[in-house]
Amino acid sequence: MSVEDKHYRWFGILIVFILVCGIIVSITFFGISRAVDTEFDTEFVEVQNHVQDNEITDSFSNEIFGSSGSSVTFLVSDRLNFSDIFYYCSDPSTEPTDTCWQYLDRHFSVTRTGRKFWHWIEHHDHITFQSVFSDPLGDRRKVLDVLDNTECMVTDATNMRWNMSDNCNTAALLNFRQIRLWCTDTWDYSNRIDDWFKTEMIERLNLRLPSKFDSRHKAIEHMYPKGSYRRIQGLYDLWADALEARWIVKQCENFEVQKTIQEFEHDSYYVKRFQKIGLSLGLEPDFFSGEISLDDVLTELSMYLGNISAIINYGGSPEWLAYRDEQHPWIISNLELFETSNTRMEKMSKGIQTVMELEDTGIDYNLNLLVHHICTDQTVPDPDSCQTTIEALRTSLKPSEWRQQQLIDRIERIALDIGVYYDPDVDIPISRE
């Protein structure tokens, strides 16, 4: 065999070797991708079935805002499981599809703003994303109407008028405050989305830091086993939080921010009126601008006029807080209920106390959400499960404490129904923000 023939032979062997390696790599990559996709899909299918079995569902109204721009064909069903967010919006890092926008419109039409640990209490002043964006110009007109209504003018910081919430359109005051916070700075819209998905490079270490979204994603996968309800709940919260930023920006872009908000801020007549109200309520001007924040005035006025959402989500003077706790003792009880240092027994006892105070005040509540918090949102080591906590508390009750006994029976039935009765594991708490 000539030298030239040997070269051709080795060249042919090399080509075959490269082709074989390429085939192996392709098969391996395809197999891994399929395995990952299958694992991902199986996980969500398992939990979706678990969710359906336990009837943890949300009902959505037919009215949507139309973020997708298609107002005729609805691609999303009227009744959705919370795990459907992964199906309709599979990748929060990319621009949502029309179907994803429709899902988000339905989801946020019933989603409440404010701190999550109040959401289980069904008071009539909850502010929803839908209410904030339904009619910004109309809310602005109602805010101006309040200024012209002498019944709505609080004279000083001791003038608590908690019977005037409806007459003075306090919901409009809070809607307008919220839309100002979300939509005033138009230049910041893209930054809110980038904040979730951008990565940062540390050149001197040749290290790229993961995005906020990826960091939370990896933490959830590390903490909870595949297919568990808690893992899917954590992933759902992550998806919803990231997509909320996209949805809010989209809504802000759908109305005239200049006409609704920015012109209002430069109207000296109304600015002076609000400054006067702020001073009468004892608010302090900003050190640099010398003016009282309009958002603080809107919040404080809503509180003094009796809007429950404002009262529970914002603080006040010591005198005001004392009046609040006297009128609504369930507020301080609920704050203590969601302290992250609580044992299950402390949460169970405080939860029962809060429910009884709500019933005495005539305010409804969602006991399922409360039971979920008591039995799963445990952040300190506690050997007791909901089962052992319920059994211990039941034996400690006196015969005269029949209301507590009835509540324990209801809590036990719900804990069994949703599958959290026996599990003592430590879990992620409901966010206090």
Image (tube, rainbow, N blue to C red):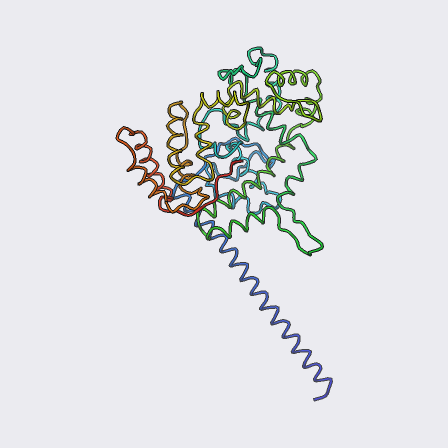
Report x, y in % for residue 97.
Answer: 59, 43
Q: In the shown orientation, is residue 93 left or right of residue 408?
A: right
- Residue extending farthest to the right is 4
Q: Front-most of 259 and 295?
A: 295
Q: State the image coordinates of residue 299 (x, y, percent, origin top left).
A: 57, 23
Residue 56, horizontal then vertical, whole percent: 42, 40
On screen, 417 above or below 118? below
Q: Seen from this angle, which residue lies furthest left?
A: 399
Extreme-top residue of the structure: 150
Q: In which quarter of the image is the C terminus?
A: top right
* Residue 328 rendering spot, x and y as whole percentages: 44, 23
Q: In which quarter of the image is the N terminus?
A: bottom right
* Above-or-below relation of 212 to 143: below
Residue lying at 55% horizontally and 31% vertically, measured from the top left: 129
Question: Hey, which quadrant is residue 248 in on the image?
Answer: top right
Q: Furthest residue to the bottom?
A: 1
Quadrant in which residue 361 is drawn: top left
Query: In this rendering, would 61 be left or right of 213?
Result: left
